[in-house]
Image (cartoon, rainbow, N blue to C red):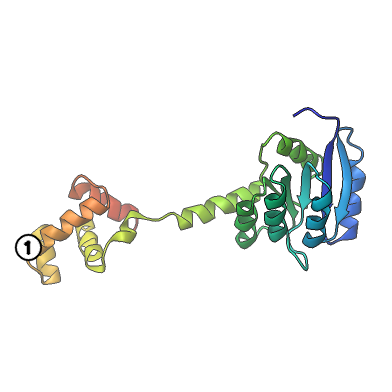
Amino acid sequence: MVQDTIKVLIVDDHEMVRLGLSAYLETESDISVIGEAENGQAAIEFCRSATPDVILMDLVMDPVDGVEATRQILALKPQIKIIVLTSFIDETQIMPALEAGAISYLLKTAKAEEIARAIRCALEDQSVIEPTVAAKMLRSMRRQEPKLHDSLTERELEVLKLIGQGKSNQEIADALFIGIKTVKTHVSNILSKLQCEDRTQAAIYANRHKIV
């Protein structure tokens, strides 16, 4: 997109933050601050009558926070690009903000030129995520990623643990006081659920995921 200036709205409940950001951004020849809002509600109202290209959005504000404001503004005018600019790196803030539609997530510790760069990138549909925020996102995603063994029953987990210890079907039957045919059924189910071709792969899986 080619245009004379990028129209920016600054949303933050601290006046000094708004003034500081505005003062810097106005020194950039391709960026123009067209408004300031002290909370999410004010930002929503602003966007009913005006259309900034990019919004710098704080998160923790009353009576409407940044996440809800992001959601409502994008429902109203989806072409607007919203960059979260906050002090918070808690996972309970990060994911809701991005899920609401924010294109980038920066911390207020970011350098002024980094914020300006993120504004320019937003106009090109490019995301900029603070490295510490990105790291938290990855950790959160890994924790939430379902494990194949989550689908195993309690008994199947017991059998898998013994497979990981190198036990034979007979030894597993003796240890769990069940019949050999029952063990074979459990082993078959385990291989299917873990997508393993044989019990050797199942044993490797059990050790890798510390089931043993």
Q: Residue at x 44, y 54 (%)?
A: 145
Residue farthest to the top?
A: 2
User: In front: 202, or 119?
Assistant: 119
Task: Please tell me whether residue 15 is drawn above or below residue 5 in the rendered image.
Answer: below
Determine the image quadrant of residue 185. bottom left
Residue farthest to the bottom?
A: 177
Determine the image quadrant of residue 157. bottom left
Q: Is residue 197 left or right of residue 25?
A: left
Q: Is residue 82 left or right of residue 42?
A: left
Quadrant the C terminus occupies: bottom left
Q: Residue at x 31, y 58 (%)?
A: 149
> Which residue type carries mark 1?
Ile
Residue 69: x %, y % from top left: 72, 58
Task: Please name the residue that numbered disc 1 is placed on.
Answer: 180
Secondary-structure class at tag 1: helix
Task: Please tell me whether residue 26 is drawn above or below residue 185 in the rendered image.
Answer: above
User: In front: 203, or 85?
Assistant: 85
Residue 133: x %, y % from top left: 64, 51
